[in-house]
Amino acid sequence: MFDIISEEILKERNIEEILLTFNYTTIYIYKRIQKKEDLNFDLPKLKNIVLKKAFVLEDLNLVKSIKEKDAIVLVNGGDIKSNTSAISNKSEVTLLNPIGTELCFDEGLAEIAKQNKKIIYFNINEIRTNQYRAIKQMNFIIPLLRSKNIEMRFVTLSRKSKDLIDEKILENFLKNFNLEKETINRFLNAEK
Amino acid sequence: MKKTKLGVIRPTLRHKKRYVLIKLINPEVILDSKKIYSVLTQSLQKTSGIFVQTECNITILEIDNKSQTLLIRTNKEYLDEFIGSLFFAQAELGLIKILEIKSTIKKLDGELK
């Protein structure tokens, strides 16, 4: 299963055991990057799970400083400005969580995302924290992206093991957004 | 008055069921069937509505405190809705892992068999 989680979760006891019960073999660990120096961080080693880096950039100009080819580079969305700048950027930057206080994603942005071959990442735990707002906006954005064949990923960004979600539960939950089983499986089992 | 027997429902007309074996990892509640039942029904009602909740016929068949596993029976037609609703149940029950879904108890390989 594809997922991005916080490095904080790795401090928990028995975390490898828990991750293995959820069938994780590779997992991305994200870190918020405010300045260039933050880019150099080391990941702990787990016996049976491969850990990879994911950067959540606060400043889009930091993209040039990233040298890791294997890493995922994300920019937090949530308002029109950040959603537009992440999607219209020609580099490898992808948009994380386009959900904001009000709907800030439209057909025009979806069209640009398609042209730039972008993948849109959704924080599925947003539904737990901002239930009404997240479901309402995702109900609009997900079918729109699906109609334009834009790739999506659903990640937990878990800070505690409690925030992790079983693949079967997530797969069935995502059916509520009018996605087909095959499409959901493709999104959940993607490598990047 | 002559007694008449109640007719037995033919197998083809019966509601098909599914048996779901669930493991709770680090549960936040004491494994009490009443509490678990109310959490499961409430989360199903939250995601799919009261009509699906009543049709789903959730029954907790067994709770194993040692292995922290639950055996739940649901209506086959609403299995996807039930599994999806566990997304919200996790907030109260703790981490949930679905071990198996089978059509009969006999087919289950889990610890509760």
Image (cartoon, coloured by chain):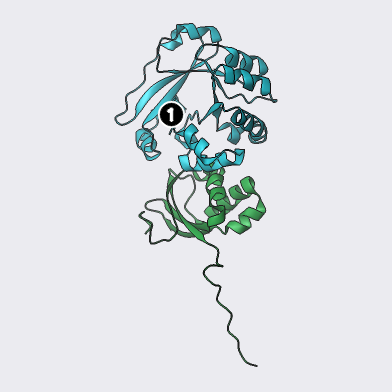
Q: Indicate whether A89 appears above or below B74.
A: above
Q: Neighbour class for label 1 at 10 Å: few (<14), some, many (≥20)? A: some
Tag 1: amino acid: Ile
Chain of the residue on which disc 1 is drawn: A
- In the orientation shown, which residue stands out farthest toward the right? A102
Residue A167 coordinates in the image, percent (x, y): 46, 39
Q: Quadrant of the C terminus of chain A?
A: top left
The chain coloured green is B
Q: Indicate whether A130 appears above or below B70.
A: above
Residue A158 or residue A106, whichever sits in front: A106
Disc 1 marks which residue? A9
- In the orientation shown, which residue stands out farthest toward the bottom? B1
Q: Indicate whether A31 appears above or below A123.
A: above
Q: Which residue is drawn at 52% across and 47% down?
A: B83
Residue B18 appears in the figure: yes
Q: Residue at x 56, y 16 (%)?
A: A116
Q: Residue at x 38, y 59 (%)?
A: B107
Quadrant housing residue B65: bottom left
- Assign a secondary structure to mark 1: helix
